[in-house]
Image (spheres, coloured by chain):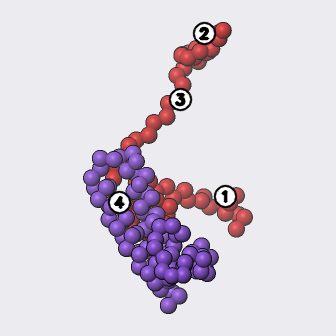
Chain colours: A red, B purple
Amino acid sequence: MANSNQCYPYCSIWGRLELARAYVVPQTFCGTFNLDQALSTGTLFPELLRPYRKKEGSACTKIK
Amino acid sequence: MYEDKVNLIKSIQLVGFAVVEMQLYLDMNPCDVNALSAYNSYVARQQNLITTYENMYGPLRSNTSQSCYPWQWINDPWPWEMVY
């Protein structure tokens, strides 16, 4: 039988802590990239574009 | 000539990607009339492009279009063997 102290809500020396919760904001259709741009960037939807630019001097850049 | 063929296959890839993207969106938002309209428009473009390609260069898929005689699917190059 589980020790009730170890179950949610979790009590610790930091107090009563809550578990992490994930959420996703619903996407709303509001236009598209042109098709060339969509395929090259990897999404048709401008609101989903995440370019993830490399930092200067990062390990990946140095390998080049 | 070959350039036309490559441009056509690239157009099919571009619009095919848009169709998949809209499909995924509509799975989550089936009542979005603007998105559905965009999806239908992309599908129509895709069908037109595929029909144009297949009329000129042969089948893109083995079992979704009619073939003239003799059976065309076995002809080289296969769609994924095109060099561009």
Mark 1 or mark 3: which comes first in sequence?
3
Coordinates of residue A11 in the picture (x, y in percent): 58, 14
Do discs 1 and 4 belong to a common subunit? no
Q: Residue type at mark 3: give it.
A: Ala
Q: Is residue B65 left or right of residue B34?
A: right
Secondary structure beneath disc 1?
loop
Mark 2 or mark 1: which comes first in sequence?
2
Q: Chain of mark 4?
A: B
Q: Is residue A45 left or right of residue B81?
A: left
Judging depth in this view, the residue of B66 and B13 nearest the camera is B66
Q: Which mark is residue A20?
A: 3
Q: Quadrant of residue A14?
A: top right
Residue under numbered circle 2: A4
Disc 4 and disc 3: Cα gap in Å? 36 Å
Q: Which mark is residue B39?
A: 4
Coordinates of residue B3 in the picture (x, y in percent): 51, 87
Residue neighbourhood size for the residue with mark 3, other residues' Cα within 10 Å, grouped as few (<14), some (14–19), many (≥20): few
Disc 2 and disc 1: Cα gap in Å? 47 Å
Determine contact: label 1, label 4, CB under 8 Å.
Answer: no
Res A40 visible: no
Determine contact: label 2, label 3, CB under 8 Å.
Answer: no
Mark 2 or mark 3: which comes first in sequence?
2
Do discs 2 and 3 belong to a common subunit? yes
Residue drawn where x is 27% and y is 52% of the image? B33
Residue under numbered circle 1: A58
